[in-house]
Amino acid sequence: MPATEAAGGAAPPAGARGRFDALDGLRGFAVLLVFCVHAAGNVAGTVAGFDMANAHFATATSAGHRLLFWLYASHHGVFLFFVLSGFLIGRMWWPGPTQPYATFAWHRTLRIYPAFLLSFVASLAFAWASGTWDPPEAGRVLANALFLNGAPGSRVVAFNVVTWSLFYEMTFYLAFPALALAARAGGARGGVSLWAAGIAVPVAAAVAGADPMVLCWSLLFGGVALAVEESRLRALAARMPAAVVVGAYLAVTTTALFEAVPGVVAIPAFGAAAVLLTAKCLVPGNAVAWVFTRAPLRALGRISYSFYLVHWMLVVVTARAVAAHVDGLGVVGAALAIFVGGFAASAAVASALWWVAERPYFVARRRRAAP
């Protein structure tokens, strides 16, 4: 799920609590990756006639299928959001809190819930209209209301398939401040213990047989590591050539594409690469930061949360509309129609949702900050 803190403005000095232009663009890049997952999956089912969820790159039978699988294997967009969220929330609580916990929790609620609830209602209507309606029980609705999708893997799930990630974000938001305050007693060592344990405990659980998705918490704490060690990691990123940082990111994601290593290795490795990429974005004047400060990516980044919430339903609707015209459009034309039409519809609806459900939060926050 998109990191839900705005990230615009000039880069502050290392360790300062400021906002960064390039992080808006990085969020835009992340949500674009997530969009590719669902657009490629719908193209595969609608145009190419195969189930992407059960496909593998090695078994792809054509260049087109391999391209679709490469786009479909962009799940690391969600993982990138986890790292960004961990960083942005981490620096709000380390080395000390920027606000009382009750205020923080209330602001998180105001920031996240309006867009979520509107998209959740829309997902109910979508399920009803599409024939996938499953009458919700009271407990199911309550779990969605409290944990923005209940516990992933349980019977308590929302109709919008993308909101599984919000469970990890929400539990992190609620628990992390207490962990950070407890770690402060240990000083610098407490900070190291905070992020190291946050990474290591989910890894150990996954190795012991837990669902590998518990590693999402490791990614969140990878972002915390960047917040705690920001000065050092920014200095390291400044010394590293942009090509090395990008190469490390591509190496990790390509290894995952070929399924060369298990998730318990691939996901933490991605976390390390994503931390480096994010740290590079914090350093102005390099190629990585320049790319992510481009206006289109930053504009998408600003509405990334709303885009994330609505894009899946709109891609499905677009694919169903295109399905009746595949013969006339041709395979390539139909595929482009789903990608372009799905993106345009998602961007339009997300912009409207941002205006209605997200903008009021930012307006109120600017008013509170005004002298």
Image: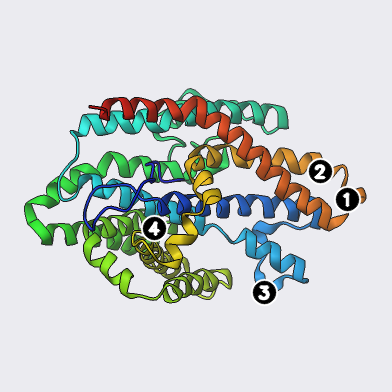
Label 4, label 3: how far apart the Cα atoms are: 26 Å
Find disc 2 in the rendering and name its residue.
322
Residue 154 in view: no
Q: Quadrant of residue 270?
A: bottom left
Label 2, label 4: how far apart the Cα atoms are: 37 Å
Q: How is the image coloured?
A: rainbow
- Residue closest to the eye, 307 or 102: 307
State the mark number for residue 58: 3
Q: Which of the two discs, 4 and 3, labels the residue nearer the N terminus? A: 3
Q: Amino acid at mark 3?
A: Ala
Question: Quarter of the image containing the C terminus?
Answer: top left
Where residue 255 sits in the image (x, y, percent)? 52, 74
In this view, the mark in front (2 or 4): 2
Q: Amino acid at mark 2?
A: Val
Q: Are discs 2 and 1 less than 8 Å apart at CB?
A: yes
* Dot 4: element: helix
Residue 285 in view: yes
Where residue 223 sits in the image (x, y, percent)? 32, 56
State the mark number for residue 329: 1
Q: Quadrant of residue 133?
A: top right
In this view, the mark in front (1 or 3): 1
* Dot 1: element: helix
Label 2, label 1: how far apart the Cα atoms are: 9 Å
Callout 3 environment at 10 Å: few (<14), some (14 to 19), or many (20+)? few
Where residue 301 sits in the image (x, y, percent)? 49, 46
Q: Amino acid at mark 4?
A: Leu
29 up-or-down from 168: above or below: below
Q: Which of the two discs, 1 and 3, labels the residue nearer the N terminus? A: 3
Residue at horizontal 80 percent and vertical 39 percent from the top: 321
Where residue 145 sits in the image (x, y, percent)? 43, 28
- Is 369 situated left or right of 273 in this image? left
Task: State the count of labels.
Answer: 4
